[in-house]
Image (tube, rainbow, N blue to C red):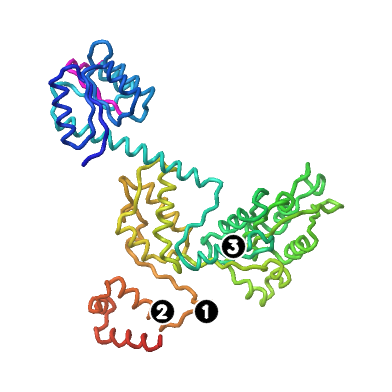
Amino acid sequence: MTSGKLLIVDDEKVAMKNLEHVMKKEGYAVTATQSGSNAQALLEKQSFDVVLTDLRMEKVDGMQILRRCRESHPDTEVILITGYATLESAVEAMKRGAFYYIAKPYRLDEVRKVVAEALEKIRLKRENRSLREQVESYQGKVRILTQDHHMQHLLDMARQVAPTDCNILITGESGTGKELFARYLHHHSRRASGPFVAVNCGAFNEELLANELFGHVKGAFTGAHADKQGLLEAASGGTLFLDEITEMSPAMQVKLLRVIQEKEVLPLGATRPIAVDVRFIAATNRDVQEMVKAGGFRQDLYFRLNVVNLHIPALSARKEDVPLLAQHFLLKHAALMGKDVGELAPDTLELLRAYDFPGNVRELENIVERGVALSNGHRIEPAQLPEDLRELSIRTFRKKEGRIPSLEEQEQDYINWVLQEAGGNQTLAAQILGIDRVSLWRKLKRYEVEKG
């Protein structure tokens, strides 16, 4: 049955009854009246999705009903029907906000089509409003969406350490959401009401980074026409997030270590230090322990920052999160763009599940945002995905438990993936792999034996 609540208004009883009968057969909930005044009284007590009203009626005409709907029920769509159609009245009706203008005698198929289109417009408006409200409800809140057990364990650990005020080092590949985790920690800490200040250490040379972090006093150097507060002082009472911490120069590492130890900062050109109360969260996509061994990062600073380590896994290691995150990004960008895109086509989702996302969550969001922008319908189809993602099933090489996998391990992963893509059909998988079925069977048996 089709959903929709309709009000039909026509002072010709036969026309009203015919239209009421037809619309009820379509599955709509229909209220019908021959009086424009009675229609206004009904509109005061309840709302309707669509109003079909005759234009010329005694006392209260169709234009007055249209005006009442626009004032009291802006979501209601009004369809005007008249036996005295003129271009001027049609233009006036549309200017005042009518959805459509139908001339008598009309075809019932035309009315059915117009009513269905009006109801679809209402559905889209309501859905987009809901999406906007949903996205707005996220603002100011730090949410990390996951179904992955390891990620849920990380979140539990983050909530546990957040109130302790200890320094934290977040590691993981680019695009995994390290800053989001830092904000999550701040949000769940006792410093949540204080500032969260983020700085990318790789975006500045040593001199500029020192100026950003420590600030300066007037006259400290040519062009210093006024005092400048540093980010360390600005973050006092809150959290300072140092992204790409391993890009910091050795000299800057020494200065930062002193701030952490002494809890004070000396702006450039100043003679007296300023006390600061800052919680440090640092992040890097590099192997810090290897950098410490190679002399590229100070061991004492590493120990100061790495009181708790949170390592965020790559998206390829938590594929079950891909549909959840993709749907979240879809709703977010559809609402921001004001588009009626509500779902991913099954084939689109399969392509995303098969992709390894070397750019991680950031890349997934970019792909979905692109899909929303290019979509012409209610869902993202494979045609709206990047061409290389559609044509290739990209398999990237990643470390396993911190080590480079062997050729045999890569072969095993590839065979398992092809078998999965073939729906478990070993004959088809063997054809894709270019080997005979017996060879595939032997390999699978050997893998089982090696598993123990």
Residue 300: x and y, percent?
A: 73, 71
User: Does 273 appear in magenta?
Assistant: no
Q: Is mark 2 on a helix, strand or loop?
A: helix
Residue at (36% x, 85% y) in the render: 448
Earlier sequence position, callout 3 versus callout 1: 3
Task: Residue lying at the far front in this picture: please name it.
Answer: 45
Determine whether, in the image, residue 314 is placed left or right of residue 309.
Answer: left
Task: Determine which quarter of the picture holds residue 303.
Answer: bottom right
- Relative vertical location of residue 58 with respect to residue 135 in this rendering, above or below: above
Q: Which of marks 2 and 3 is nearer the N terminus?
A: 3
Residue at image position (55%, 62%) is 155
Residue under circle 3? 158
Which amino acid does the dot numbered 3 rest on? Ala
Density class for disc 3 (Cα within 10 Å; few <14, some 14-19, many ≥20) is many
Circle 1: residue type: Arg
Number of residues whose C-alpha sits closer than 10 Å to that of mark 2, classed few (under 14), some (14–19) or many (20 or more) = some
